[in-house]
Image: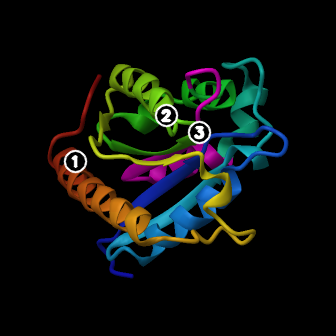
Amino acid sequence: MTENALRVAIVVGSNRSGRFAPAVATWFAGRAGEHEGVRPDVIDLGDLELPTVLGDPAAAAALAEATEALERADAFVIITPEYNHSFPGSLKNFIDAHFTQWQAKPVAFVSYGGMAGGQRAVEHLRQVFAELHAVTIRDTVSFHNPWGQFDGEGRHLEPEGANAAAKGMLDQLAWWGHALRDARAVRPYSA
């Protein structure tokens, strides 16, 4: 891994019992780890005790490690299911617990769900990240009815199309990640 590697925080946005997120996250983290110049760091909301009340010291302490990972990151990938035509409340809670960590950094999306493949969740997330002064990547990776597309180890059973989509998205994320990291070094961003 090069010294100039882009630190990419992959946020697994579902903490629901019986969730499908680990299969998608395992597959995508593998793609990110193989992408030249990318250093992935997975933050799984299923592993965190998300606070129900934001802004108090206990909430900040519960999220301290995840907050540090977001702060270190040059770019983000949000893995989200689509629940009721949007993204999970746990993900919104996690996003809202942070502000400056997202600013002037690119965000890409991997989504999954029924016939829409999670795209309605992604459209809602784009609005949230615009408000947080983040730049969203146009291309996404989405899985329509994905439940039979992965094995128990998180391996995609027919990976060619999905791998190509992930590579294209990661190429765009890397471009934006480097451009914005360089820009922040020259001229710090203020919102």
Q: Secondary structure at mark 3?
A: strand
**Residue count near mark 1 (Cα–Cα under 10 Å), binned few <14, some 14–19, many ≥20:** some
Residue at 59% in and 39% down:
113
Identified by mark 3, the residue type is: Gly
Q: Residue at x 22, y 45 (%)?
A: 184
Bounds of the magenta segment: 65-86
Look at the image and say whether residue 118 sits in the magenta stretch: no
Circle 3/circle 2 CB separation < 8 Å = yes
Residue 5 image offset from top left, x and y in percent: 34, 70
How far separated are the C-alphas under marks 2 and 1?
31 Å
Dot 2 amino acid type: Ala
Residues 149 and 60: in front is: 149
Q: Residue at x 51, y 71 (%)?
A: 158
Please name whichever residue, 180 or 169, is drawn nearer the observer in this view of the structure: 169
On the image, numbered disc 3 is attached to which residue? 113
**What element does badge 2 sit on?**
loop
Which numbered tag is attached to residue 180?
1
| Earlier residue among tags 1 and 3 | 3
For marks 3 and 2, give the CA distance.
6 Å
